[in-house]
Amino acid sequence: MGSNIHNYMEVLVGKRFIELNFHQFYTLDQISDIKCIALNQLPTLYIRHSLDMLAATPQKKLVQYDDMVAAAVENAEKMVANDRRERKDDFENIVVYAPKDRFELEDEEIPFSGEIKLD
């Protein structure tokens, strides 16, 4: 892929991290973990130019993307904050977080789940 192609969700997650001042509260390893966990909850949206994408996308959809990112980052932060690898106590109270409010986008492709029959 060309160097100018990137996942727009990475841009939004990075923006959210700056808004929440994560660099003041977490180590670089924790920040990397939170980013990975958050991005795994989000759909990929590959673009070449952010400005073109912003101009071509309705405001309602941009707000929806921001809401999705906020929920994914919140879930990821909880997972890292409650990291069972760091706890010394027993494992009776393990909390498992599921993706919160996974938004379905009206133009998001549904993965193919049928059979392919070749003649």
Image (cartoon, grey):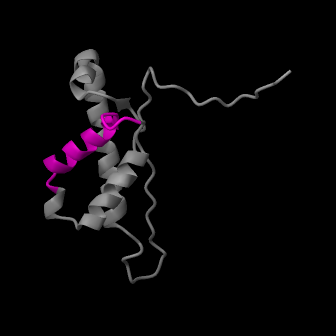
Give whichever of 74, 47 is nearer the camera. Answer: 47
User: What's the residue at 31%, 31% (across, down)?
Assistant: 65
* In the depicted structure, whether residue 36 falls above or below residue 81: above
The spot of residue 40 in percent (x, y) is 43, 47
Q: Is residue 2 magenta?
A: yes
Q: Which residue is farthest right?
A: 119
Q: Is residue 54 magenta?
A: no
Quadrant housing residue 114: top right
Residue 9 is left or right of residue 54, and the answer is right
Q: Quadrant of the C terminus?
A: top right
The spot of residue 67 in percent (x, y) is 28, 35
* In the depicted structure, whether residue 16 falls above or below residue 65: below
Give whichever of 115, 6 is nearer the camera. Answer: 6
Residue 32 is left or right of residue 116, and the answer is left
The spot of residue 39 in percent (x, y) is 38, 46
User: What's the residue at 31%, 35% (across, down)?
Assistant: 8
User: What's the residue at 41%, 72% (across, down)?
Assistant: 84
Total numbered labels placed on residues in the image: 0
Quadrant housing residue 117: top right
The spot of residue 4 in percent (x, y) is 30, 34
Quadrant housing residue 13: top left
User: What's the residue at 23%, 46% (across, down)?
Assistant: 14
- Which contiguous range is marked in magenta? 1-21
